[in-house]
Amino acid sequence: LVAEAGAFVSAPLHAPVAGRVAAIAPRPHPSGRLLPAIEIETDPLSAQRLPAGPPLDAAALDNESFVAELQSAGLVGMGGAGFPTHVKYRLPAGRRIERLLVNGCECEPFLTSDHRLMVERAGDVVRGAEIAAAQLGVAETVFGVELNKADAIAALERAIDGRAAMRVAPLAVKYPQGAEKMLIRAVYGVEVPSGKLPLDVGMLVNNVATMTAVADWFDRRWPLIERVVTVSGPGVRRPANLLVPVGTPVRAVLERCGGLTEDTREVVMGGPMMGTPLASLDVPVVKGTSGLLAFTADEARLPTEYACIKCGRCVEACPQFLNPSRLGRLSRAGRFEEMIGYHAMDCVECGSCSFACPSGIPIVQLIRVAKGALRERAAAGAAK
Ligand code: SF4
Ligand code: SF4
């Protein structure tokens, strides 16, 4: 353990390699900011693989102890959001989770890290879900996987191997579908009301990679120190899915894949629609890094922006039934508080509005800026 959680909504950090702490200092972060970081000088003789510890019987734990274990493992949502997993498992008094939904939808182009994980570690995906489901006492566990991942569906069905109240739900291939509320809608046809959580409809959603991390912690006592990362895009010489220690510099991961082509213009962390363009390659892979994509000038070129022509295409494209055009305008004017009334916080940042906009307006970026500012204001208000 190299950093303890500073609060309940926080996850500790475990050293992903053996070595020596060389510095604790501000370093570039994928968000573009300088953030405090622990720099570890790797012992060149260290083995990357941890010895497995004795399994911990999760079924013997009460909810409070189970939540504490998840936090100790440093688990966060590995689909990209990075929200500490244990927080979802602390149930308010009198509340129950009836259904556990395991998110195997990976709908952004290029990303295949979850797909490979479902094929190669289906047993651990199912085992992690089994541990979580038993703790929650759910009536059903469903793995939502798109139909274009037939091998993953088959691998999960084999791994389920007749376990009661567990099934794979093959889903239509469409974008976006990976956000929690959309997955619930796709599998059960249930709408999570605006401003509410899956818990409010008796459901909990976890990504497949998070489920393998649950199995790793309870069955082997391995904390979350590595993850599968898709390295792809036209600018990568040898695209691959790699198991990468958290904290590895992006530059080193790209070099492992043969480096970038000369015409690469942009490297994105995450998918092409929802990912974050990196200002520097000297940032670390973090727990939520599903992909590193490199684009050449052709794909990375920003469209010229024109005035809104009120065509309504962004409204039609929005899976959350928002008015992206209005939200973008309010954000540009700095009228962030007003955006709450237009359900800005329900935006899943899928980028469909920006993609559909013939005027090239960066709507999702504008909404993202506003949401970030609103969250910071809310956090500052809570800290007072
Ligand atoms: S990014 Fe745009 S399309 Fe996607 S949910 Fe947000 S407003 Fe709607
Ligand atoms: S798609 Fe673009 S041009 Fe059309 S209404 Fe939305 S913001 Fe305006």
Image (spheres, rainbow, N blue to C red):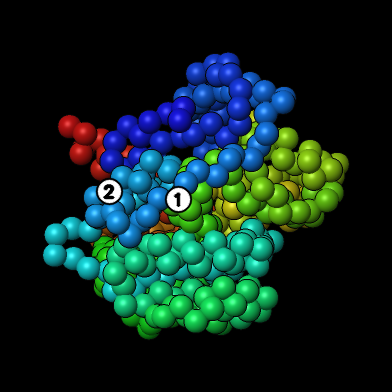
> Which-is-in-front pick, marks 2 and 1?
1
Picture layout, residue 54 above or below residue 360: above
Question: In x, y percent, where is residue 263?
Answer: 83, 45
SS state under label 1: loop
Question: In x, y percent, where is residue 384?
Answer: 17, 32
Q: Which mark is residue 65?
A: 2
Identify which residue, 368 or 258, lies in the foreground: 258
Identify which residue, 381 or 131, lies in the foreground: 131
Horizontally, is 378 left or right of 279 in the view?
left
Identify which residue, 305 or 55, lies in the foreground: 55
The amino acid marked with disc number 2 is Ser
Q: Earlier in the sequence, mark 2 or mark 1?
A: 1
Question: In x, y percent, where is residue 10?
Answer: 35, 40
Question: Does residue 11 appear anywhere in the picture?
Answer: yes
Picture layout, residue 50 above or below residue 180: above
Picture layout, residue 213 above or below residue 165: above
The amino acid marked with disc number 1 is Pro
Question: Does residue 311 appear anywhere in the picture?
Answer: no
The quadrant in which the N terminus is found is: top left
Q: Which mark is residue 218?
A: none
At a point 66% along the width and 63% down the height, the residue shown is 120
At a point 58% along the width and 40% down the height, the residue shown is 51
Identify which residue, 169 or 106, lies in the foreground: 169
At a point 44% along the width and 65% down the height, the residue shown is 129
Question: In x, y percent, where is residue 307?
Answer: 53, 59
Q: Are marks 2 and 1 in contact (CB under 8 Å)?
A: no
Estimate how packed mark 2 is, as few (under 14), some (14 to 19) or many (20 or more) residues with alpha carbons within 10 Å. few
On whether ligand 1 comes within 8 Å of the CB at mark 2, the answer is no
Q: Which residue was labeled with disc 1?
A: 55
SS state under label 2: helix
Question: How far apart, in angstroms, are the residues tagged by discs 2 and 1?
Answer: 15 Å
